[in-house]
Amino acid sequence: MKPAEKMISSNFCGMTRVKIFQSHFQLHFQLHFQCTMQNIKKILVVDDEKDCCDTFHRFFTRRGHHVDVAYDGKKAKDLLEYNSYDYIFFDCNMPEISGIELVKFIDVKNPQAQKIMISGYDGINKEFTDALNIDLFFKKPISLEDIQRVVET
C-alpha cells in the first residue's frame, strides 16, 4: 500500500472496504459513483437548530441516504465547495450566512440540487421563494412524511 493511502472499514453506500486517498476529489468521485449506482441520494441539511439537523440525519441515513449536516451557512458553503448534493434542505434565518445568501452560492456551486427551504418565519410566501428560484418551501414544523415524499419522488 502506498503511503498516501490508508484502508478503512465502511459500509457506506453498500461498500465493505474503501480505499481512501488523501485527495478529497478522488474520494468524492468514488462515493458519488457508488451512490449513483445504488440510487442513494446525497443530502445536505443546513439549520442552526441542532435537533432539526439530527432528526433529518437519522431519518435519511436509516433509509440508506448519505447526509451531511451544517449548523450554519458558513459550514454549508465549506461543504458545497467540495461536494455536490441531490437535495439541500435549509433554514432561512441562520447565523453567519442566511439561507437567502446560501441560495445564491448553491446556484453557482451545485445548480442541479433541489433547494428546499424550511422556515418558521411567517413572512415567506410563494413570490419570495419563486424570486430566489427555490424548488420547495415548507413551514416549520414539518412532518417527516412530507420530507420523505420530496426525496422519493
Image (spheres, rainbow, N blue to C red):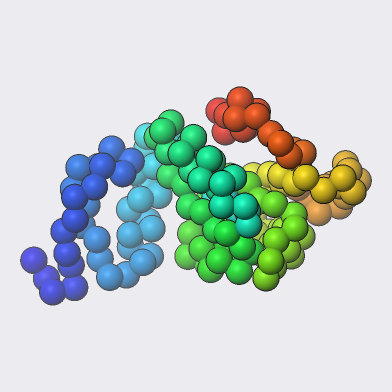
Left-right relation of 114 to 23: right
Who's the residue at 51% across and 63% down the image?
Answer: 79
Quadrant holding the C terminus? top right
Compared with 22, 20 (above or below) is above
Number of numbered markers: 0
Left-right relation of 15 to 121: left
Who's the residue at 69% across and 34% down the image?
Answer: 142
Quarter of the image where one finds residue 95 = bottom right
Please identify the residue farthest to the left as the structure is shown. Answer: 1
- Residue 37 shows up from this direction: yes
Residue 126: x, y in percent? 88, 41
- Residue 88 shows up from this direction: no
Compared with 139, 100 (above or below) is below
Who's the residue at 13% across and 74% down the image?
Answer: 3
Residue 89: x, y in percent? 63, 47
Compared with 147, 46 (above or below) is below
Quadrant holding the N terminus? bottom left
Residue 14: x, y in percent? 28, 38
